[in-house]
C-alpha cells in the first residue's frame, strides 16, 4: 500500500484546541459573520459574549474555523476569512452558508484530515491507520509511534485520549434512542452525516467504512486529486497513489477502487479538460495540464455546489 508522508513540522502537531467540543454546523457561520465586523474578535477577552457561548466553547469555535480552513490567524493580531470561508458563508454569494449540503460536509472533512499539523488525530486516522478496524487504545499507540518516529513531542495520554474521543464523536452517528446532551451535540455535527466511521456494538471497536459515496460530487474527487498532485510536485499521478496515497481522494473520502475508477473515467468532463485519465500499457494514471492554475480550486468547488441546486 502506498503511503507518502508529507513534509511537515513535527513540533507543530496539534492534539488540542477543540476543548473537547465537537464541530457544530452553526458555529462557523456565526464566527465568519462576527469576524467580518471585528477581525480582532478572538483576541478579545469577551469574545465568548459576542459569540453567545462559554469561554471554552469560544476557543473551540476558533479552533474549528482554523482547521476547517474557513479563517486564518494573521500576524497583526486578527483573523481573516479564507477564500473558502468567503465562498461558503457570504450572505449574498455564499455557496452554502448554513452547511446543509453534502458538498459542504465533504469539503470540511477534506480540510480537517488532509494536513497533519492542525488536527493530527484526524489526519492519522484517515491517512495512515493500519487496518480497517481499531480500538481507541490501538489508535493511540499508533499515533504515539508516528509522532516519536518523526521527532515530534508526544502528547500526554490524557490529551491524546480526549482528542481521539472528540474525533470519534464527530463521525460516529449517535443512537437517537439514547436521549441526552451528548446525542443532541452529535446531531449538530455535519461530519456524522458522512458515514465514515461505525462503532461495532459490544466490542469497543470502530470500523472505517469504505464505499461508493453517492453523495460525494465528482468535482470534490477532482479537487482532492489536484491537491495531491501539487503536494507530489508533478502533473501525473498513478491510480494506486490516488487510491492509497497520503491525502489522496481514495484515502480521505474512503472510496473503494471501483468507485474511484468510475470517478476518474469522468475526470476530463468534470475538469473541462484540465485533466484526463488514461490506461496505456497497463499504466493507469491521471495527468493535469497545469496543476498550478489558481482558478482550478474555486471552479471545481463552484461546480460541485452548483449541482446541489443551491448556488445561484
Image: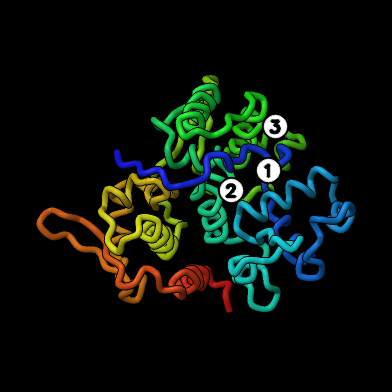
297 up-or-down from 43: above or below: below
Q: Are marks 1 and 3 in contact (CB under 8 Å)?
A: no
Direction from residue 91 to residue 190 in the image, left or right: left
Q: CA distance from mark 3 to mark 2?
A: 19 Å
Quadrant position of the C terminus in the picture: bottom right
Q: Mark 3, mark 2: which one is toward the viewer?
A: 2
Q: Mark 1, mark 2: which one is toward the viewer?
A: 1
Mark 1, residue position: 22
Mark 2, residue position: 191
- Residue 215 makes an appearance in the image: yes
Residue situated in front as seen by the camera: 5 or 51: 5
The 10 Å Cα crowd at callout 1, few under 14, some 14 to 19, many 20 or more, is: many
Direction from residue 282 to residue 23 in the image, left or right: right
Q: Residue at x 84, y 49 (%)?
A: 53
Q: Which secondary structure lies at badge 2?
A: helix
Q: Residue at x 74, y 63 (%)?
A: 76
Mark 1 and mark 3 lie on one chain; the one further toward the N terminus is 1
Quadrant position of the N terminus in the picture: top left
Amino acid at each position: 500500500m502506498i503511503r507518502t508522508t508529507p513534509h511537515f513540522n513535527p513540533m507543530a502537531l496539534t492534539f488540542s484546541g477543540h476543548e473537547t467540543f465537537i464541530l457544530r454546523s452553526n458555529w462557523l457561520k456565526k464566527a465568519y459573520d462576527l469576524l467580518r465586523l471585528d477581525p480582532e474578535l478572538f483576541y478579545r477577552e469577551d469574545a465568548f459574549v459576542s459569540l453567545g457561548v462559554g469561554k471554552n466553547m469560544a476557543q473551540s469555535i476558533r479552533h474549528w474555523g482554523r482547521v476547517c480552513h474557513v479563517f486564518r490567524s494573521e500576524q497583526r493580531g486578527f483573523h481573516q476569512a479564507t477564500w473558502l470561508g468567503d465562498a461558503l458563508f457570504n450572505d449574498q454569494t455564499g455557496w452554502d452558508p448554513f452547511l446543509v449540503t453534502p458538498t459542504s460536509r465533504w469539503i470540511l472533512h477534506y480540510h480537517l484530515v488532509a494536513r497533519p499539523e492542525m488536527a493530527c488525530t484526524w489526519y492519522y486516522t484517515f491517512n495512515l491507520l493500519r487496518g480497517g478496524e481499531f480500538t481507541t487504545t490501538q489508535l493511540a499507540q499508533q499515533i504515539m509511534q508516528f509522532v516519536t518516529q518523526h521527532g515530534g513531542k508526544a502528547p500526554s495520554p490524557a490529551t491524546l485520549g480526549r482528542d481521539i474521543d472528540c474525533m470519534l464523536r464527530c463521525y460516529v452517528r449517535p443512537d437517537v434512542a439514547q436521549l441526552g446532551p451528548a446525542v443532541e451535540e452529535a446531531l449538530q455535527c455535519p461530519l456524522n452525516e458522512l458515514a465514515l466511521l461505525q462503532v461495532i456494538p459490544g466490542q469497543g471497536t470502530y470500523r472505517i467504512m469504505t464505499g461508493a459515496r453517492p453523495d460525494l460530487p465528482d468535482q470534490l474527487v477532482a479537487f482532492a486529486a489536484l491537491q495531491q498532485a501539487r503536494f507530489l510536485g508533478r502533473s501525473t499521478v498513478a491510480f494506486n497513489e490516488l487510491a492509497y496515497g497520503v491525502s489522496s481522494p481514495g484515502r480521505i473520502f474512503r472510496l473503494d477502487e471501483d468507485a474511484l475508477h468510475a470517478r476518474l473515467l469522468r475526470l476530463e468532463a468534470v475538469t473541462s479538460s484540465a485533466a484526463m485519465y488514461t490506461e496505456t500499457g497497463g499504466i493507469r494514471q491521471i495527468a493535469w495540464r497545469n496543476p498550478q492554475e489558481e482558478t482550478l480550486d474555486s471552479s471545481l468547488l463552484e461546480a460541485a455546489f452548483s449541482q446541489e441546486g443551491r448556488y445561484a
